[in-house]
Image: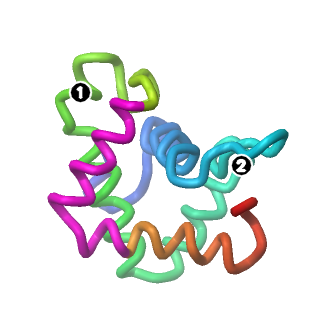
Amino acid sequence: MPTKEKTLTDADRTTLKAIMDRLVPAVDDLPGAGSMGLAQEAERIAGKVPRLQESAVKVLGAVSVDMRSHARGGFQALGPESQDESIREVESTIPADFANFLEIAETLRGAGLTAA
């Protein structure tokens, strides 16, 4: 879970990578966005825009407290369907923050850093 200072822990970075792989999945031989190393770029982009950083922290925090994640050893330990369910739950619970989180992915896509 993100720190009080709204910075990401190593566990948050692992979760961010897994979420990005679900939002921008692998296509053919191209890995998902998180596996391409774009989680670091997403964190950098969010860090430049306070609204995006706050939303990323909230989304990652919400995923970390999801009971499915706790029961199985973290978001990344969940199967794809359970990961998608967790993401949908966060999206429906904090829609404005989730929209801001998606804006980070769209910024990466606009910069030509993702496949889709």
* Residue 68's disc number: 1
The percent coordinates of residue 106 (x first, y second) are 57, 74
Instruction: Return the residue nearer the eye: 42 or 5.
Output: 42
Q: Please, which residue is most extreme toward the front here?
A: 28
Q: Which residue is mark 2?
A: 37
Amino acid carrying mark 1 in the image: Arg
Position in image of residue 100 (x %, y %): 38, 75
Outermost residue to the top? 72
**C-alpha gap between disc 2 and disc 1:** 25 Å
Of the numbered discs 2 and 1, the one sitting upstream in the chain is 2
Q: Is residue 95 magenta?
A: yes
For the point 21% across and 36% down, which residue is it? 66
Direction right: furthest residue: 29
Q: Secondary structure at mark 2?
A: helix
Residue pictured at 45% horizontal, 40% vertical: 15
Q: Quadrant of residue 85?
A: top left
Q: Which residues are magenta?
A: 81-99
